[in-house]
Amino acid sequence: MYAQNALLISPAVIARLRHERGPRWQELVEHVITLPQDHPESLALGLTLIQINGCLNCETDSYRAMRGCTACGKQMLRRFKGSDEQLLERYQLALDEVRMYLEAHPARPAVREKAPARAA
């Protein structure tokens, strides 16, 4: 009954949105989908789409969610009133935001290299 939905915009959804705007948008999407999911540029493109579309307010039982993230993303890109340049400017702002966040919150190792010694 429900379409495939993600908590956040996934790389698979982003790839399906490549032909929804002009050549510069297509170039950006084609570049970003070759990057790892945790790359700042990949995160920034997802953030851009989330911000424009209001994905954080999407409820799993809403009409938008039932249609699925791809259909919703396509509709959002078609309805976006700005030019492709304005869309890319929003992406650049999101990239700056991601980079500032990553600088302020350096990555911590997920696993310790050596377990702490146990007291005997």
Image (tube, rainbow, N blue to C red):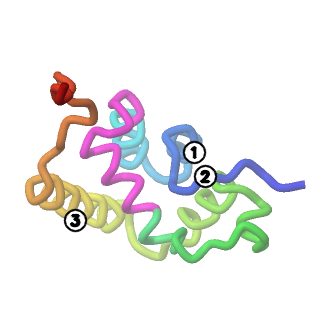
Tell me where residue 38 appears, x and y as whole percent. Answer: 32, 39
Nearer to us: label 1 or label 2: 2
Q: Is residue 74 left or right of residue 45?
A: right
Report crowding for label 3: few under 14, some 14 to 19, many 20 or more residues within 10 A (C-alpha): some
In magenta stretch: residue 41: yes
Query: What residue do we see at 26% from left, 62% from top?
Result: 94
Q: Amino acid at mark 1?
A: Val
Q: Is residue 19 left or right of residue 110?
A: right
Report crowding for label 1: few under 14, some 14 to 19, many 20 or more residues within 10 A (C-alpha): many
Residue underneath mark 3 = 93
Residue underneath mark 1 = 13
SS of the residue under disc 3: helix
Query: What residue do we see at 57% from left, 45% from top?
Result: 13
Q: Which residues are magenta?
A: 33-49
Of mark 2 and mark 3, the one earlier in the sequence is 2
Q: Is residue 27 left or right of residue 108?
A: right
Tell me where residue 55 appears, x and y as whole percent. Answer: 54, 68
Query: What residue do we see at 21% from left, 30% from top?
Result: 112
SS of the residue under disc 1: helix
Of mark 1 and mark 3, the one earlier in the sequence is 1
- 102 vs 70, nearest the viewer: 102
Q: Amino acid at mark 3?
A: Leu
Residue underneath mark 2 = 6
Mark 1 and mark 2: Cα distance apart in space: 9 Å
Q: Quadrant of residue 93?
A: bottom left
Q: Are marks 1 and 2 in contact (CB under 8 Å)?
A: yes
SS of the residue under disc 2: loop
